[in-house]
C-alpha cells in the first residue's frame, strides 16, 4: 500500500494551445485535508478533474491510492470507486429519487442487493441529516440539501479520497453551513479530502494544508496559518486581500 | 355542390380496412425505425470515430433522398440483386430505414441536450460509459425527445401513403380504388383525410399523455 493517497509528478495539461496546468507536483498523505485556493481560471478545478480522469492530461503521472491512473492499462472505472467527487452543481440525477441516486452505483457497480443498498443509503442520508428526503426528487430539495445528497451518494461507494470542486459556490448563503458541517464531520473522521474552495473560513479551520494555484502553477503550499497570515508570494497576498475579511 | 354522404358511408368498411393496413405498416416501421434510430443516435455520440462516421453517412444519405425513391429502390431495385420482397415487407423496410435516420438525429439531439455534468457524475461513481448512458443519460433524454418522436410518428404515418405506389392496399390506395369505381372523389378523399386525422390525432394524444406520465418530481 502506498504512503500517499495522491501523488502527482510533473503534470501538464493543455486546452489547445492554452497551458492550463504547469508541472504540478504534489503528494497528499492519507487522512490529510487539503484546500486548493486560487483565482477563477487559475486551473484549480481542472487540476481536480484531472485527478479522477475526467480530464485527460498532456504529460506527467498521477497515482491515486498507489494506482497509476495515467497508465492506459489501468481500469479507470475501478479507480474511480475509491474517489468520491463532489461538483459545484451537485449533478444529482433529476429523474431519480434521492434514494435511487445513491443506490444506482451500489447496485450496478458494487452489485449490492436492493435491500442492502437501501439500508446503506438510509444510514448515509441520516449522516448528512436528510433521512426524511429519501423519496424526494432532487428538484424538490434546496441546493444545500442536494449537495448533501451528492456527498452521501459519493460516500456510499466507500471512497478513500473525497474531492470537492467548489462545493458551496452554487448555494444560497443560508445553506452553505449545512454542507460545510458535513464536510467538517468527514474531516474529523479522518477522510482524505481535496477541496477546491472559495470558503476561506473552511480552509483556515478545517484544512491541514492549503495550496495556492496561480496561472496553472502551485505557488505556495503550506499550513493554513502560514498561507493566510504569512503569505510570501505577492500574488497570493493580493489574492487574499481581495477575498478575505479577517 | 352536393356531398353524397351515402357514398362515403358505403366506403367505410373498405377505408377501415385500408386504415388498418396503414396502421400496421406504420407501427412496424416505427419499431424498426426506433431500433435503428437508437443505435444510430448512440453511435453519433459514441467516442469511437468509426461508429460516428458510419452513422453520419447513413443519416445524410437517407435524409438527402426522397422516401418515394427509397421505397422504389427496395421494391423494384433489390430484385436485381435476387431479392424479391413482398410489397408490404418492402414498404415496411424502406419506411423503417427512412425513419431510423430521423429518429437517430432526434436521439442524438436528446443525448446532447443532457448537461455534461450528468455523465461526469455517473462516471465518477464508477459506472461505465454504457451504464451511465443507459441509467442516467438515456432516461432523461427520452423525456425530452418524446414530442419530437411524436412528430416523427405522425409524419411517418402520413408518409405511409407513398407505399400505395407499390400496390399496397393501405388507406390512400383503398380510396383510389373506391373512386375508380364510384367517381365520388370529393367524398372519398374527405373520408380518407378524416381517417388519417383520427389516427394522427390519437398518436398525438398518446404522446401528450406519456409526456405527462414521464415527468418527474414536479
Image (cartoon, coloured by chain):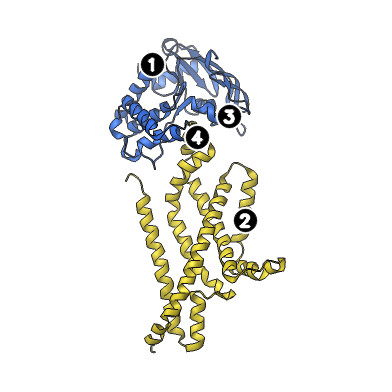
Chain colours: A blue, B yellow
Residue B80 locus on image (x, y percent): 71, 68
Residues marked 2 and 1, same chain: no
Frontmost of labels 2 and 4 is 4
Q: Which residue is mark 3?
A: A75
In the rendered image, the vertical position of residue B80 relative to residue B35, given as above or below:
below
Label 2 – label 1 distance at C-alpha? 56 Å
Toward the left, the furthest residue is A132
Task: Sort mark 1 into few (<14), some (14-19) or many (20+) by Cα contacts within 10 Å.
Answer: few
| Quadrant of the snapshot with the N terminus of chain A | top right
The quadrant in which residue B211 appears is bottom left
Disc 2 and disc 4 in contact, CB within 8 angstroms: no
What residue is drawn where x is 55% and y is 31%? A55
Badge 3 element: loop
Query: In which chain is the residue bearing label 1?
Result: A
Query: In which chain is the residue bearing label 3?
Result: A
Badge 2 element: helix
Frontmost of labels 1 and 3 is 3
Q: Which residue is mark 1?
A: A189
Label 3 – label 2 distance at C-alpha? 33 Å
| Quadrant of the snapshot with the C terminus of chain A | top left
Badge 1 element: loop
Residue A8 locus on image (x, y percent): 57, 19
Q: Which residue is mark 4?
A: B127
The quadrant in which residue A22 appears is top right
Label 1 – label 4 distance at C-alpha? 27 Å
Labels 1 and 3: the sequence-earlier one? 3
Amino acid at each position: 500500500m502506498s504512503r500517499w493517497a495522491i501523488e502527482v509528478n510533473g503534470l501538464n495539461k493543455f486546452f489547445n494551445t492554452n497551458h492550463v496546468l504547469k508541472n504540478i507536483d504534489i503528494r497528499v498523505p492519507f487522512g490529510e485535508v487539503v484546500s486548493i485556493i486560487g483565482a477563477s481560471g487559475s486551473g484549480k478545478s481542472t487540476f481536480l478533474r484531472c485527478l479522477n480522469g475526467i480530464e485527460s492530461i498532456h504529460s506527467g503521472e498521477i497515482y491515486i491510492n498507489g494506482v497509476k491512473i495515467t497508465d492506459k492499462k489501468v481500469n479507470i472505472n475501478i479507480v474511480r470507486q475509491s474517489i468520491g467527487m463532489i461538483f459545484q452543481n451537485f449533478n444529482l440525477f433529476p429523474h431519480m429519487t434521492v434514494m435511487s441516486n445513491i443506490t444506482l452505483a451500489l447496485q450496478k457497480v458494487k452489485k449490492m442487493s436492493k435491500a442492502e443498498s437501501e439500508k446503506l443509503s438510509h444510514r448515509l442520508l441520516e449522516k448528512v441529516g436528510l433521512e426524511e428526503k429519501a423519496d424526494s426528487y432532487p428538484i424538490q430539495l434546496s441546493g444545500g440539501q442536494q449537495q448533501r445528497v451528492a456527498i452521501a451518494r459519493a460516500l456510499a461507494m466507500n471512497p478513500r479520497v473525497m474531492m470537492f470542486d467548489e462545493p458551496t459556490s452554487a448555494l444560497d448563503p443560508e445553506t452553505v453551513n449545512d454542507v460545510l458541517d458535513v464536510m467538517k464531520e468527514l474531516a474529523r473522521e479522518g477522510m482524505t479530502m481535496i477541496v477546491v474552495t472559495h470558503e476561506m473560513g473552511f480552509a483556515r479551520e478545517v484544512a491541514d494544508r492549503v495550496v495556492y494555484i496561480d496561472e496553472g502553477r502551485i505557488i505556495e503550499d503550506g499550513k493554513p496559518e502560514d498561507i493566510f497570515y504569512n503569505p510570501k508570494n505577492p500574488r497570493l497576498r493580493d489574492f487574499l486581500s481581495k477575498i478575505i475579511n479577517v | 355542390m352536393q356531398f353524397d354522404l351515402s357514398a362515403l358511408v358505403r366506403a367505410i368498411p373498405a377505408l377501415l380496412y385500408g386504415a388498418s393496413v396503414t396502421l400496421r405498416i406504420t407501427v412496424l416501421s416505427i419499431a424498426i425505425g426506433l431500433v435503428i434510430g437508437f443505435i444510430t443516435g448512440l453511435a453519433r455520440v459514441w467516442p469511437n470515430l468509426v461508429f460516428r462516421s458510419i452513422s453520419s453517412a447513413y443519416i445524410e444519405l437517407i435524409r438527402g433522398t426522397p422516401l418515394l425513391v427509397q421505397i422504389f429502390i427496395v421494391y423494384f431495385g433489390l430484385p436485381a440483386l435476387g431479392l424479391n420482397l413482398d410489397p408490404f415487407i418492402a414498404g415496411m423496410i424502406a419506411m423503417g430505414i427512412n425513419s431510423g435516420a430521423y429518429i437517430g438525429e432526434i436521439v442524438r439531439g436528446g443525448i446532447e441536450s443532457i448537461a455534461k455534468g450528468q455523465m461526469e457524475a455517473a462516471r465518477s461513481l464508477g459506472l461505465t460509459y454504457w451504464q451511465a448512458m443507459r441509467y442516467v443519460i438515456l432516461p432523461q433524454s427520452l423525456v425530452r425527445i418524446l414530442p419530437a418522436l411524436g412528430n416523427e410518428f405522425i409524419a411517418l404515418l402520413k408518409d405511409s401513403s407513398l407505399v400505395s405506389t407499390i400496390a399496397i392496399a393501405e388507406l390512400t390506395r383503398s380510396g383510389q380504388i373506391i373512386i375508380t369505381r364510384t367517381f365520388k372523389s370529393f367524398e372519398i378523399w374527405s373520408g380518407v383525410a378524416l381517417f388519417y386525422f383520427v389516427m394522427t390525432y390519437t398518436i398525438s394524444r398518446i404522446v401528450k399523455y406519456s409526456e405527462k406520465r414521464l415527468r418527474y418530481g414536479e
